[in-house]
Amino acid sequence: MTKDKEYNNYETELEYIFKEMCNRVGADFDKLDLEKEDWADDYSWKMEDEIEFQVWLYNYLTNNDVAFQAVQSLPYIDSDKISKMVRNFCLFYGWALESDFEVDYSVYKEEFELLDEETDTDLEENNPQ
């Protein structure tokens, strides 16, 4: 198989997987901007929906070697075990998870700012240039 044909096959399989993911939340794949930072935050799903998708993806990758290789070629997947690939796929490419409760993070503004300062200091101390 030539590199171009392999790339086209991977692209086709990834598109199929993303379309399935979109269908589960009512998103239009053709209008999705995958180049946009945090594009996966535009939609959300319940934990149960993500688990159902993971089961579907696991079965799909188990029975489709080209899809397996296509997902494996994505950044951040870094595994040859299907279960780990599926978890990483949902972690890095899946929709945001809906929570059963709303949190007003503005109440914790000072704590978050302090945490950011401590994190910056820790990074500077532990990563001398």
Image (cartoon, rainbow, N blue to C red):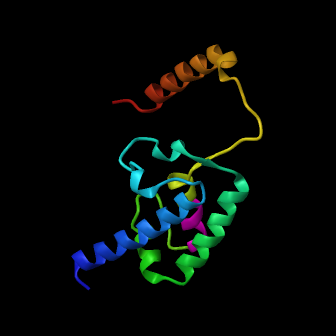
Residue 77, given in percent of the width and then of the height, sits at 48, 62
Tag count in the figure? 0
Residue 101, x across and y down, in percent: 77, 35
Q: Is residue 100 above or below residue 21?
A: above
Q: Nearer the viewer, residue 85 or 44?
A: 44
Question: Which residue is rendered at x = 70% and y = 23% of the image?
Answer: 104
Residue drawn where x is 53% and y is 26% of the image: 119
Q: Name the residue rendered at 54%, 84% in the picture.
A: 63
Q: Residue at x 42, y 33 (%)?
A: 127
Which segment is the magenta one?
A: 82-87
Determine if residue 51 is in view.
yes
* Quarter location, residue 86: bottom right
Q: Magenta part mainly helix, strand or loop?
A: helix
Query: Is 32 one of the magenta-colored residues?
Result: no
Is 115 rendered above or below residue 91? above
Horizontal side, residue 78 vs residue 8: left or right: right
Residue reaching furthest right? Answer: 100
Q: Where the N terminus falls, by quadrant?
A: bottom left
Residue 88 seen by the camera: no
| Image x and y of residue 43, in percent | 56, 46
50 lies above or below 127: below
Residue 98, image x, y percentages? 68, 44
